[in-house]
Amino acid sequence: AQSVTQLGSHVSVSEGALVLLRCNYSSSVPPYLFWYVQYPNQGLQLLLKYTSAATLVKGINGFEAEFKKSETSFHLTKPSAHMSDAAEYFCAVSAGHWGGSQGNLIFGKGTKLSVKP
Amino acid sequence: DGGITQSPKYLFRKEGQNVTLSCEQNLNHDAMYWYRQDPGQGLRLIYYSQIVNDFQKGDIAEGYSVSREKKESFPLTVTSAQKNPTAFYLCASSLAGDRETQYFGPGTRLLVL
């Protein structure tokens, strides 16, 4: 079975500061991991995904995440926050081709990012 | 432009009424999904379909029904048995060979009168 924990339901940073959103996962098989972003009253947009290739994954809008098996983590970072980054971010895990979930994603509860001018 | 459309954007349901949410995609994706989003709860899977005329229950299927008569369409009906239907509903789709990478529609917000 898979599960995801996002630490911090709300994170606030100043414009230009480092963004760090935390995600820890639990999985009985090698996981596939994802970060999605949601702007108010909109659907989710895929930021980046890890599917057992390079452990450092680069995504859109300057975001990246590093898969650390020893820490069961997949934290999302961006060196310099922009006002337009204010949104809700969701981490998700899937059993991928290993499990019987047939691709079903398990989502964390989300972290709202606020960016102060 | 390829994508996923959901309609309506807002939907109001009266007590005891069934309502249907539309989801259409022109991405030629085989798999489609319905999620429910509540504040602070993340997304929870209601139903999914990997092929036409076949679908499976997700984690919270009670009070909902779906059909998949066409590859492009996956409507969700919120029945009167769903006692707490107020939520944001998201439809998603994926390729058969990459089911984990899902593309989402803009969502429908369902409110109870």
Image: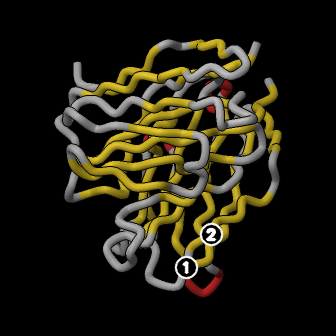
Q: Residue at x 34, y 37 (%)?
A: B67
Please provide percent x and percent y for residue A43: 51, 30
User: Pointers 2 and 1 in contact (CB under 8 A)?
Assistant: yes
Which numbered disc flags the more N-terminal residue, 2 or 1?
Answer: 2
Q: Is residue B43 visible?
A: yes
Q: Is residue B99 left or right of residue B91?
A: left
Image quarter of residue A89: top right
- Tag 2 subunit: A
Q: Is residue A77 left or right of residue A103?
A: right
Three-letter amino acid code at disc 1? Ser
Residue topped by disc 2: A3
Image quarter where the C terminus of chain A lies is: top right
Q: Between A85 and A108, which is closer to the camera in this rendering?
A: A108
Q: Residues within 10 Å of mark 1 (few under 14, many from 20)?
A: some
Three-letter amino acid code at disc 2? Ser
| Disc on res. A27 | 1
